[in-house]
Every structure is written in C-alpha cells, then in structure tokens.
Image: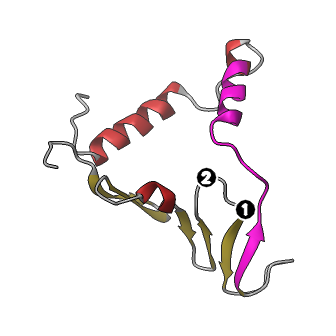
C-alpha cells in the first residue's frame, strides 16, 4: 500500500560512547512477533526476543562473569507485563507520592529525537 507515512525506517543515533540503531518496517508480515531488543558491547551481547512475554534472555559474553559463563547462555527472567509498572508509577506521581523520574527537558529531547529520526520538523 502506498502512503506518505515513514513507517519503513532505520535510524542511527550516535553517542559519545555508544551507537544505537532502531529499525521499523510497517510492511513486515507478523513483525510484532519478532520485535526484539539487542545491546552489544565490547565484552558481551544481550538479546531479548520476544519483547513481550519472554521467559529468558540470550546472553553472550567474551569471558566468564560471576555466575555467567563465557559464550552463549539463556538466562531466565521474571515475567514482565508491559505498562503495568509505568501506570503504577504514574499513579504515584498523580497522588504526589513521588516526582517524575525524568525532567520535562528529557521528555522534550526524547520526542524531538523521535521526530527528527522520522524526518519530521521540530520547529525549534
């Protein structure tokens, strides 16, 4: 389907000590089932797939680290329900039981980054 949406994208975000890539494809069949998150470092990689309802993460290390061995291993993780913790945290803010974890400037920077990565103007 032809449209004007930027829903097939690759964004590269460069930081002083890191590089992040974010890929999205609105055309991928059943792409949601394959959503994943990968963190790569000089001494290891962590791979979470699927993002929702995962029972373990794949950890790959260049050398042994405490109870984790060198090489590939699946590490069990506790069940996680997306948004539940965020909603509970937001309720505490509304009840004045805590402050937001992030400043308004942080939120603005995140939204501007998303807009810029999507090729949209930020008008700032």
Total numbered badges shown on the rendered structure: 2
Instruction: Give residue 11's quadrant in the image.
Output: bottom left
Gap in angstroms between the C-alphas marked 1 and 2: 9 Å
Residue shown at the point (48%, 32%) measured from the top left? 107
| Quadrant that contains the C terminus | top left
Residue shown at the point (39%, 35%) measured from the top left? 111
**SS at mark 1?**
loop
Q: Position of residue 38 (x, y in %)?
A: 54, 66
Residue shown at the point (22%, 28%) measured from the top left? 123
Query: What residue sits right under mark 1 in the picture?
Result: 55
Q: Which residues are magenta?
A: 72-91
Query: What residue sits right under mark 2 in the picture?
Result: 52
Figure check: 63 above or below 36: below
In the visual, does 113 lie left or right of 98? left
Q: Are marks 1 and 2 in contact (CB under 8 Å)?
A: no
**SS at mark 2?**
loop
Figure check: 111 above or below 90: below
């Amino acid at each position: 389907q032809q449209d004007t949406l930027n829903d097939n994208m690759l964004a590269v975000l460069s930081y002083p000590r890191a590089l992040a890539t974010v890929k999205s494809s609105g055309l991928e069949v059943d792409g949601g089932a394959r959503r994943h998150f990968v963190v790569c470092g000089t001494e290891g990689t962590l791979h979470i797939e699927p993002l929702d309802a995962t029972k373990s993460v794949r950890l790959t290390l260049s050398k042994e680290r405490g109870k984790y061995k060198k090489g590939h291993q699946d590490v069990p993780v506790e069940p996680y329900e997306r948004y539940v913790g965020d909603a509970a945290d937001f309720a505490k803010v509304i009840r004045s039981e805590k402050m937001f974890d992030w400043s308004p400037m942080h939120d603005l920077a995140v939204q501007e980054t998303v807009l810029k990565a999507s090729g949209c103007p930020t008008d700032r």
